[in-house]
Image (tube, grey):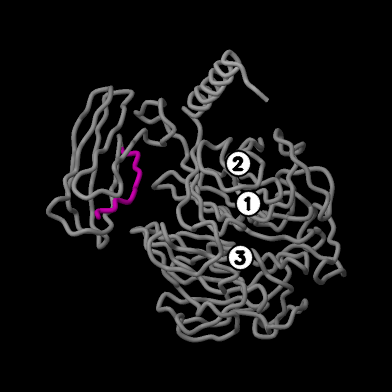
């Protein structure tokens, strides 16, 4: 079909107008980028730009900002250090069951992970039907489970789980498990005794049909509960996958529905924003509660991250709703079944495990503290070229008079260069010269009035 010159001009104008709208709409929106993972299955350590994973699932973060990933189908726990280097934290990469030194231990599809205050990590070892511990001195032990699927309470060494998924700890060290195909939340006390904390019923086993009942403790009913997240008041939030709802278990063991309505079962999901009592989800397998009390939900089959705010209003936080692997402003970005998530409050970002993209994504949360909103970048910063051989330039646009700091560190944390100025509103730039430095990775911190962002520079 031949297109007239006038039609071509109109089409070009429409495209330009659409791009302008996209840019304008992004001023106060979140922005999605890829932190680590190539989009393809693999098992490669090293820099985040080359590292690869195999259907990662759960995620957590330590006190200094290192990110840890339950790399389920690589059967190990991976670490993404603050310097952007990916390594194997525990496990050999081969499916199996073996306690001992972390580098020699074996897991079989570890799904979710969390830390205690002493630096010990806890792992729900899905196919092994066990709960494992990676101590701060890198020794792996079994906390509970016999390795045989079932439902047995009592002493941890004799207890049985049915494909454990979610895991979290309360402020006294008790461990809670989303015991998916027992349709229960289990508790492992600090004395090593396993009990039913919430949920009950006689129907258990893979593909069994759970139920939906809000009630106290074991009178409540779940349908394949997955990830758990706990707040400062020991309220446990549950991603109740096949009930397509987010549930809450308070410290008195009362179970209520936070958000979600509609059908039940694998085909019962839907999509609807709005009040929690009217909202709909489709197979939410992950939930994370922030220190502010907001809930972030991996709404898997809807291919989006959702937010439930403290007023119980549900909105789409990021994702277009179409499966894919696209970065950009939140409403245009694409995921392929978002799983675990965790907030880094220092960097004002939410890490999201992108299951079928074999990647970790970042949702940079929009902020307007002392900054112009005329950019999709969360701190209105552009750095380039990167990689570079001699010089790179930091360009930024301030809305108000602000204190600006830029720090350059090597991977060991040593300070290489610093810039500290009071700057007026407007456009500014600072050029960093790396001529006399060896090639490799350097880290920068860009701060405006205390709002910080970190990034990586590659000197060739």
CA gap between label 3 and label 2 equals: 26 Å
The residue located at (55%, 60%) in the rendering is 40
Mark sitting on residue 319:
2
Residue placed furthest toward the left: 436
The kind of secondary structure element at disc 3 is strand
Residue 155 found in image quarter? bottom right
Residue sitting nearer the eye, 382 or 210? 382
Disc on res. 336: 1
Q: Residues within 10 Å of mark 1 (few under 14, many from 20)?
A: many
Asked if the residue at tag 1 contacts the one at tag 3, i.e. Cβ–Cβ closer than 8 Å, the answer is no
Whichever of callouts 3 and 1 sits on the residue coming sooner in the sequence is 3
**Secondary structure that dominates the magenta span:** strand
| Relative vertical location of residue 433 with respect to residue 74 in this rendering, above or below | above
Which residue lies at the image location 74% right of the left edge and 37% below the top edge?
A: 272
Q: Is residue 229 visible?
A: no
Q: Which residue is mark 3?
A: 167
- First in sequence: mark 1 or mark 2? 2
Where residue 177 appears, x then y in whole percent? 65, 67
> Which class describes the residues within 10 Å of circle 3: few (<14), some (14-19), or many (20+)?
many
Which span of residues is magenta-colored?
450-460
Instruction: Mark 2: give few (<14), some (14-19) or many (20+) Cα within 10 Å.
Output: many
Of the numbered discs 3 and 2, the one sitting upstream in the chain is 3
Quarter of the figure with the N terminus? top right
Q: Quadrant of residue 305?
A: top right
Distance between mark 3 and mark 1 Cα atoms: 23 Å
| Circle 2 SS class | loop
């Amino acid at each position: 079909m031949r297109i007239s010159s006038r039609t071509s001009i109109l089409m070009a104008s429409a495209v330009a107008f659409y791009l302008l709208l996209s840019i304008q709409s992004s001023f106060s929106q979140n922005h999605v980028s890829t932190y680590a993972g190539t989009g393809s299955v693999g098992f490669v350590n090293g820099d985040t730009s080359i590292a690869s994973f195999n259907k990662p699932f759960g995620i957590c973060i330590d006190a200094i900002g290192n990110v840890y990933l339950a790399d389920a189908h690589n059967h190990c726990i991976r670490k993404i250090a603050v310097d952007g280097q990916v390594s194997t934290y525990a496990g050999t990469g081969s499916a199996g069951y073996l306690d001992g030194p972390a580098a020699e231990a074996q897991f079989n599809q570890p799904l979710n992970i969390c830390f205690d205050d002493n630096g010990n990590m806890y792992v729900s070892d899905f196919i092994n039907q066990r709960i494992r511990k990676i101590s701060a001195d890198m020794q792996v032990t079994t906390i509970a489970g016999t390795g045989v699927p079932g439902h047995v309470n009592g002493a941890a060494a004799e207890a049985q789980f049915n494909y454990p998924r979610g895991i979290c700890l309360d402020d006294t060290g008790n461990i809670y498990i989303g015991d998916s195909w027992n349709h229960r939340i289990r508790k492992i006390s600090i004395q090593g005794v396993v009990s039913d904390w919430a949920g009950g019923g006689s129907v258990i086993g893979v593909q069994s049909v759970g139920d939906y009942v809000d009630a106290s403790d074991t009178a409540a009913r779940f349908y394949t509960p997955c990830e758990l997240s706990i707040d400062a008041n020991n309220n446990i939030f549950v991603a109740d996958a096949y009930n397509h709802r987010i549930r809450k278990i308070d410290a008195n063991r009362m179970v209520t529905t936070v958000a979600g309505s509609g059908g039940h079962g694998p085909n019962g999901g839907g999509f609807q924003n709005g009040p929690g009592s009217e909202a709909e989800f489709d197979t939410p397998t992950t939930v994370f509660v922030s220190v502010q009390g907001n809930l972030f939900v991996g709404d898997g089959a809807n291919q989006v991250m959702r937010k439930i705010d403290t007023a119980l209003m549900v909105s789409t936080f990021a994702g277009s709703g179409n499966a894919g692997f696209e970065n950009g402003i939140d409403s245009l970005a694409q995921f392929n079944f978002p799983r675990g998530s965790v907030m880094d409050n220092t960097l004002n970002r939410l890490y999201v495990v992108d299951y079928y993209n074999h990647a970790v994504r970042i949702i940079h949360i929009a902020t307007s503290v002392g900054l112009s909103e005329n950019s999709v970048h969360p701190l209105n910063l552009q750095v380039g070229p990167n990689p570079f051989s001699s010089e790179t330039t930091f360009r930024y646009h301030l809305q108000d008079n602000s204190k600006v700091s830029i720090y350059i560190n090597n991977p060991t944390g040593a300070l290489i260069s610093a810039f500290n100025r009071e700057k007026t509103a407007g456009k500014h730039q600072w050029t960093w010269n790396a001529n006399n430095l060896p090639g490799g990775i350097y880290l920068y911190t860009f701060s405006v009035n205390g709002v910080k962002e970190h990034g990586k520079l590659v000197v060739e």
